[in-house]
């Protein structure tokens, strides 16, 4: 193939594949991205990048969530890019997941407050003070539910 003279050395190029293996601590979920029946394979020459593919196929999926009370709530998720598959992309589209995310944030703030607030810690250690605090919170919740 190559003609080398004296002193010539062949260097083989090391090429790595463009697809990386999934790390062991990750999970790959695979699902059809649309409720439409699968199309037969077709060549679409105008699609040059990933955003063109999403714009052409417009993938959407009807997803069913189970609420705290056991009821089901369905929402349709639309995918316009790879970012829509992450936690923020899916949560941004779903009102139910957005509400759950907000509740989670509120609870995390409350736990942080419990860990750092010495007055609140001592209040919760006293049985009578804890009961009074809980009744106050319950009355606030009732008041907020009545105004909503």
Image (cartoon, rainbow, N blue to C red):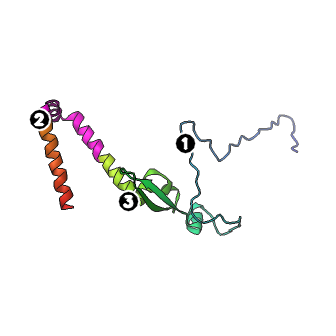
Residue at 62% x, 41% y is 21
Q: Position of residue 77 (x, y in %)?
A: 48, 61
Disc 3, SS: helix
Disc 2, SS: helix
Residue 25 part of the magenta-drawn span? no
Residue at 59% x, 57% y is 32
Disc 1, SS: loop
Mark 1 surroundings within 10 Å by alpha-carbon count, few (fewer than 14), some (14 through 19), many (20 or more): few
Region rendered in magenta: 106-127
55 or 70: nearer the eye?
70
Camera-near label (1 vs 2) is: 2
Which mark, by number, is residue 129? 2
Residue at 57% x, 62% y is 34
Q: Residue furthest front?
A: 70
Q: Position of residue 99 (x, y in %)?
A: 34, 54
Q: Position of residue 124 (x, y in %)?
A: 17, 33
Which mark, by number, is residue 27? 1
Q: Which quadrant of the rendered structure holds the N terminus?
A: top right
Mark 3 surroundings within 10 Å by alpha-carbon count, few (fewer than 14), some (14 through 19), many (20 or more): few
């Amino acid at each position: 193939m190559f003609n080398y003279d004296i002193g010539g050395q062949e260097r083989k190029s090391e090429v790595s594949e463009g697809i990386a293996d999934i790390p062991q601590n990750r999970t790959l979920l695979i699902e059809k991205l649309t409720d439409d029946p699968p199309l037969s394979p077709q060549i679409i020459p105008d699609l040059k990048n990933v955003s063109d593919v999403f714009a052409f196929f417009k993938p959407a999926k009807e997803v069913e969530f189970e609420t705290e009370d056991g009821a089901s709530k369905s929402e349709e998720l639309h995918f316009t890019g790879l970012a829509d598959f992450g936690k923020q992309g899916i949560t941004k589209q779903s009102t139910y997941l957005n509400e759950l995310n907000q509740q989670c944030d509120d609870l995390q703030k409350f736990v942080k407050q419990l860990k750092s607030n010495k007055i609140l810690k001592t209040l919760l250690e006293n049985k009578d003070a804890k009961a009074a605090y809980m009744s106050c919170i319950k009355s606030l919740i009732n008041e907020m539910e009545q105004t909503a």
